Image: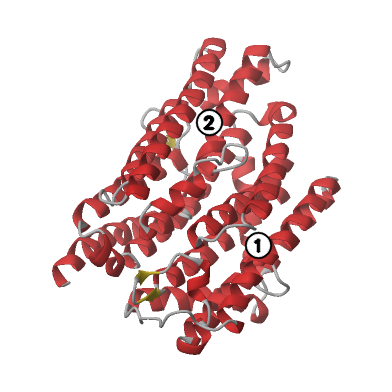
Amino acid sequence: FKSMVMPAAQAGLVLLTTLILVLAQFSTAQGHSFGGMMVHDQYAVLFKAMVLLAALIAVATSVRYNDTQTGRQFEFYILMLLATLGMLVMIAASDLLTLYIGLELQSLCLYVLAAFQRDERKSNEAGLKYFVLGALSSGLLLYGISLLYGVVGSTSYEMIYDYIWRNPEASLPMMVAVVFMLAGLAFKLSAAPFHMWTPDVYEGAPTTATAFFAVAPKLAAFAMLMRLLIQPFGQMDDVWQQIVLLLSALSMLTGAFGALRQQSLKRLFAFSSIGHMGYALMGLALNGASGISASVYYLLVYAAMNVGAFACILSLQNKHGYIDRLDDIKGLVKEQPALAYAFGILLLSMAGLPFFAGFVAKFYLFDAVVYAGYVKLAVIGVLSSLVAAYYYLRLCRLMFFDAPIASFVPVNSLALGIVIVISTVFSLGFIVYPASDTLDFVRILIGIWLKS
């Protein structure tokens, strides 16, 4: 087992060192590099730190599972590091070519991680589906970029912004380019109706890879999309705003209703992530400081809840192996009460029940949406939350009120325990300390970014 820990420790050290270096630049982050193709600002530092922390947690919580399930540690962590590098490039991209390079570096690594268990049929199927549909989404994105380049004559965000400022009336090729690019990027966010890969990939991939997919790539893709729409296409909000509103509504409804009939934990959390991306897109659609701040704040809470939830899933094991079926978590409280209560708190927070972190995040988001006049979208969000609460509460019922089917086997992992405790305290901590302080920090940062 000690030989298995070394690759994870080395990968963790690389991520931790990078995280420290990134955070050290927070107060001085300003300017461009690589001929203006990458930007350094506090917005990028914030999302880079979130992605690096999510990747670090994914590495730390994967050792025990990979030791027994995959057996190939070195390659797994190399792929995670390369995927994280791609995400950092995506976040800092200020040119469409840089954006595409970072996106493809991330995607190619994720395809391999999804199919990492070569002897498992579901894992091979997950990798193949992810690759085929990912190639299609990349084609849509590239087609939009090529159309845009044909009109503007440049792929630089600054040049695109200047062109739109000089030509405020959007031409048909420009509108088509924006639509194709949004379609390609919505796939990376697993936003409906471009979500079809998500349940199969989440279920078939190794659980440690799924835990990685659920947080870090979503944060990077959202940061990239937000910078793209607000900076170069900020003056074309009449074109993309309606599309984002539609993506948001469809994602919330798909995530809520799609999870109702699921019997796999990982498939259920796949639909959960689709719904959460729909909530985050609500704020982006407002194209204002309050909406964007609420979305960034929601993503922060979403990431904290999800790393804890997947740490709980990685801690679920019976005599047959790691658990994925919903029925297998029945009676968890009778044998592992601490794990059951922690998982229950995280599920209640994800459901958005009052006074948990998830409720506070949704409250600020819905408040910004209603204040901006999008009452119908807020109603869809509230109704979707009510439907989604059913399957989160269903998991709690199985753990606390049903008799166990098989005995649970403790998974002795210090890293998993630490992540579960911190995530649970974070979800409960909003009862103790005011969440408004965190939101105010995000608002100040986003305000500075929008003025720059």
Q: Height in image: 449 above or below 165? A: below
Amino acid type at circle 2 is Gly
- Residue at image point 35% right, 67% down: 61
- Residue at image point 52% right, 68% down: 326
Q: Position of residue 246 (x, y in %)?
A: 72, 37
Labels 1 and 2 touching (C-beta < 8 A) = no
Residue 184 is labelled as 2
Q: Nearer the viewer, residue 44 or 343?
A: 343
- What is the secondary structure assignment of the residue under circle 1? helix
Q: Can the viewer see residue 232 in this picture?
A: yes
Q: Specify whether 349 is left or right of 323.
A: right
Q: Position of residue 422 (x, y in %)?
A: 48, 76
- What is the secondary structure assignment of the residue under circle 2? helix
Q: Specify whether 81 is left or right of 275.
A: left
Tell me the distance, in whole angstroms, between the alpha carbons under discs 1 and 2. Answer: 30 Å
The quadrant of the image that shows the C terminus is top right
Q: Specify whether 427 is left or right of 145.
A: right
- Residue at image point 59% right, 83% down: 400
Amino acid type at circle 1 is Leu
Q: Position of residue 101 (x, y in %)?
A: 38, 31
Q: Specify whether 94 is left or right of 3.
A: right
The image quadrant that residue 416 belongs to is bottom left
Residue 161 is labelled as none
Q: Nearer the viewer, residue 447 or 69?
A: 69
The image quadrant that residue 451 belongs to is top right
- Please name the residue that numbered disc 1 is placed on: 439
Label 1, residues with CA under 10 Å away: few <14, some 14-19, many ≥20? some
Q: Nearer the viewer, mark 1 or mark 2?
A: 2
Which of marks 2 and 1 precedes in the sequence?
A: 2
